Amino acid sequence: MEYRHLGKSGLKVPVLSFGTGTFGGKGELFKAWGSTDVAEARRLIDICIDAGVNMFDSADVYSGGTAESVLGEAIKGRPRDRLLISTKATFRSGEGPNDVGSSRHHLVQAVDGALQRLGTDYIDLFQLHGFDASTPVEETLSTLDDLVRAGKLRYIGVSNFSGWHLMKSLAISERYGFARYVANQAYYSLVGRDYEWELMPLAQDQGVGAVVWSPLGWGRLTGKIRRGQPLPANSRLHATADMGPPVPDELLYRVVEALEKVGAEVDKTVPQVALNWLLQRPTVSSVVVGARDEAQLRQNLGAVGWNLTPAQVAELDAASATTRAYPYWHQQGFLERNPNPV
């Protein structure tokens, strides 16, 4: 397993981390993802650790907190200092008016709840699951700084932020000496490359590592979806397609066909090639993979230990290219002044 620094922090993380969205299976969305219980979770975690994957990602909204509880039970008895636990909060976690967002009230409550469910006294990486425009950024960052100084959090990051959300936060951290975001858990895949437009240049400039979520495009790059064929009966897209990012059919088919071609050249599966492409992108620290069962997990682990050639990367780049939104399409025409991240 390869390990990389998380942004410009001193923390090294595995290039693949394991997502626990399949743990618990409560609610329509998460039931469609999977219903892994504690015994199954222990087995999957064993496989991860044997492969060098020691980072496990969760969130308080995954199955209403059950995913964190299952993860906590599954890691009991293991050396805590050998594991990296990441989780997220800010989405609504209760019916009360303060059970949502990034206020001091909610963040303190959310962190304490996560620690209890996870059965630990600290979280290695705590990420805001989304931006809260109704709370002053200074309040959010001062609260996170207090939690870091109290030893409850080791590192902090964000998820689903716009570029200006993240840059404003980094500027305020610098101004007041608050703990700084070192990670951005972002949606990024061969059928969703918007991350490259603004967040990737920002990440390279500011030293923020990408922790990629849904690297297979909300389940579209599993290799089971083909041009001219119906959606497989067991695809989670039957239940969750409308909840995730839209992808034009022609783009999807073009990308899958390119993945199949490259996969045949390197003797790898469609998902393995899609994941390996991500691991070669600038600013990517770790890619979060999930699995309903052992077979899926082992296939995902096969994405490391080898690399696509530059020509194969370029072929996949071309197949997945789309017109950028303004002003990014305009900036792209002047690479002499606005070079791509490297």
Image (spheres, rainbow, N blue to C red):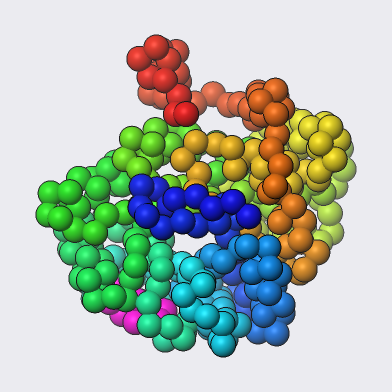
Q: Residue furthest left?
A: 176
Q: Is residue 138 visible?
A: yes
Q: Where 188 falls versus 122 (above or below)? A: above
What is the span of residues highlighted in magenta in the rendered image? 107-115
Residue 114 counted in the magenta span: yes
Q: Where 10 falls versus 330 (above or below)? A: below
Residue 254 x %, y % = 74, 30
Q: Where 275 falls versus 252 (above or below)? A: below
- Nearest the viewer among 33 and 81 is 81
- Nearest the viewer among 171 and 12 is 12
Q: At 38% across and 23% down in the image, what residue appears?
A: 327
Q: At 58% across and 26% down in the image, what residue appears?
A: 322
- Nearest the viewer among 168 and 31 is 168
Residue 31 counted in the magenta span: no
Residue 248 x %, y % = 66, 36
Q: Is residue 213 visible?
A: no
Residue 341 picture quarter = top left
- Nearest the viewer among 93 and 194 is 194
Q: Is residue 137 left or right of residue 226?
A: left
Q: Is residue 202 left or right of residue 177?
A: right
